[in-house]
Structure formats: structure tokens, C-alpha cells
Image (cartoon, grey):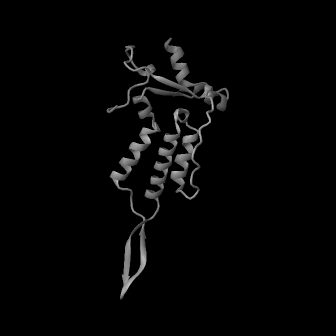
Amino acid sequence: MPGPPPKLPEERRRANKDVVEMTTVDISELVSRPIEIPAADPGWHEIALGWYESLQGSAVATLYEPTDWWTAYLAAEQLDRLLKPQFVGFEEHGEGVTEAKFVRTHIKGSEMSALLRVMNELMTTEATRRRLRIQVKREQAQAELIGNVTSITKNRREAMS
């Protein structure tokens, strides 16, 4: 769905019914499923490795099928290649080619754009999840982790009621 991400239901002024209902994933009620997740390559660049491993703790990962995990693996592999030094040619010394030349270059815009499209297909950003009408609720889980800290969002909702 192109365009800006839609507002969350509680942020809207009008309460018109959505054409497509919002799907909500509440991480406090997740059920583990026996899906085999491809192991990360320990040789990946730290950013690619961190991104791939962070997917396993993501609420939307509960919606992933095996093909989604392999798509994520492919994206991490590509990210690794883009972040590591890249071969650009050979240097000539005297009579012939003597050494390969590796140069760390910036990531090209087209490469990054293609990679981000794949990542968006995996629902890795809030904007993508909003476009797909998927909302992740972390209030209860965060409250359990933090303790007795009061949620500002919850207070606002209660004040408006």
C-alpha cells in the first residue's frame, strides 16, 4: 500500500470503520510454533548479524513462515556483502597484475533501496506494519519488564475516556 503510513486507531479523530480491519499481535499471548529458523552466519558483518537476530525477538516473527525466514536470511546475506569491503579490480605493477584491490565503498542508493524493499516485505518497520493494518502491543510486556512504571499512553487513554 503506497503513501504515508496510516494513523493508529487511537490517533484518529474520526471513528469510521476501516475497509480492512487492523490485525493486532499481542506479544504476551504468543504461542511458539515449530518453524525451523536458518542459523545466522557468524561471519556476517555485525549490523547484518544484529538485524537478522533481532527478527527472532520481533512480534511479527510469529507470523513468519519458513519462506519468510529464508527471505530474511537472503536480506542479511546481501546486507553483509554491502557492508564489507568490495573487490574493485587489480593493481598493475610493472609487467603484470600483482595484487587484488579491495576498497570499502559506500552503499549505492539502488542497492539500499532494493534491500529496504525486501526488509519492508518482512514487516520490519512500523510504517509497513501500519500499512498492512498490523499493530504490535507491547504495553503489558513492557510493564512487566519495567515494573511499576506508568504508561503515558495508558494515562492519556484513561483521561480521554
- The residue positioned 52% from the left and 36% from the top of the image is 64
Outermost residue toward the top? 161
How many dots with numbers? 0
- The residue positioned 51% from the left and 19% from the top of the image is 156
Placement of 45 over or under 116, stated as above or below? below
- The residue positioned 41% from the left and 29% from the top of the image is 132
Q: Quadrant of the N terminus?
A: top left
- The residue positioned 59% from the left and 29% from the top of the image is 27
Please provide percent x and percent y for residue 58.
Answer: 55, 37
Please provide percent x and percent y for residue 81.
Answer: 45, 58
Please provide percent x and percent y for residue 2.
Answer: 32, 33
Placement of 7 over or under 40, stated as above or below? above
Left or right placement of residue 145 versus residue 62 in this view: right
Placement of 98 over or under 38, stated as above or below? below
The image quarter containing residue 36 is top right
Q: Nearer the viewer, residue 39 or 129?
A: 39
The image quarter containing residue 16 is top left
Left or right placement of residue 10 versus residue 155 in this view: left
